[in-house]
Amino acid sequence: MTRRHVGLYPGTFDPLTLGHLDIIQRAVKLVDHLVIGVATNPSKSPMFTLEERMEMVRSETAPFVGNGRATISVETFDCLLMQYAEQVGATVIVRGLRAVSDFEYEFQMVGMNQRLNPDIDTVFLMADPRHQAIASKLVKEIAVLGGNVAPFTTPNVAKLLTERAKLGKASE
């Protein structure tokens, strides 16, 4: 029996960007099953609820399955990444890199994760050059300040983001 390769792509996805989608589209070619782990991160104040973020990821990644690519599940987690990776049977953690600053942080994380579980590897995928500058934090800031977020995410997510940003302004 061949071993099933499960990848885990963790993140807060607040909001889901074209950069995230680029990494997901490439990750489904590398594993048999991709778990997209939507993290609850108390140190960040998300614009969207956990349920909204999970629904965004589910709807926007639905076209990526089939044609020999991996299956995808979107799940939430609120524990240590390596504990969650073990729970879902991940053989690899998928991480996207945009810049050298990402690498420095990720390099430290890999070292710690390897100490926690040396059987789970981390694979880095470089962001497509068109998406290297995209960061969820910046996309949210553009939306809040009334800018056009369409170049950074899908039409559906851009609409939700613009609506949420307007609601936030109205409540101030």
Image (spheres, rainbow, N blue to C red):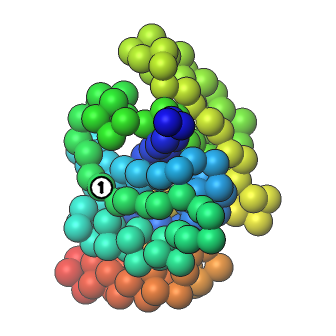
Q: Which residue corresponds to the image point at 58% horizontal and 57% vertical from the top-left?
A: 28
Please state which of residues 90 and 78 is positioned toward the viewer in this rendering: 90
Q: Percent x, y for residue 59?
A: 41, 78
Please state which of residues 61 and 39 is positioned toward the viewer in this rendering: 61
Q: Which residue corresponds to the image point at 30% horizontal and 55% vertical from the top-left?
A: 75
Q: Residues within 10 Å of mark 1 (few under 14, many from 20)?
A: some
Location of residue 65 with respect to 77 vertically, above or below:
below
Instruction: Give the side of residue 123 with respect to residue 7, left or right.
Output: right
Instruction: Give the side of residue 11 with respect to residue 49, left or right.
Output: right
Please state which of residues 76 and 34 is positioned toward the viewer in this rendering: 34
Location of residue 107 with respect to 61 vertically, above or below:
above
Residue 64: quadrant of the picture: bottom right
Outermost residue toward the right?
129
Q: Percent x, y for residue 47?
A: 31, 67
Q: Which residue corresponds to the image point at 54% horizontal and 58% vertical from the top-left?
A: 70
Q: How many marks?
A: 1
Q: Which residue corresponds to the image point at 49% horizontal and 36% vertical from the top-left?
A: 1
Camera sees residue 48:
no
According to the image, label 1 marks what residue? Answer: 75
Please state which of residues 15 and 93 is positioned toward the viewer in this rendering: 93
Q: Percent x, y for residue 94?
A: 55, 42
- Quadrant where the C terminus is found in the figure: bottom left
Location of residue 63 with respect to 155 vertically, above or below:
above
Residue 149: quadrant of the picture: bottom right
Q: Determine whether the residue tagged by mark 1 lies in a helix, strand or loop.
A: strand
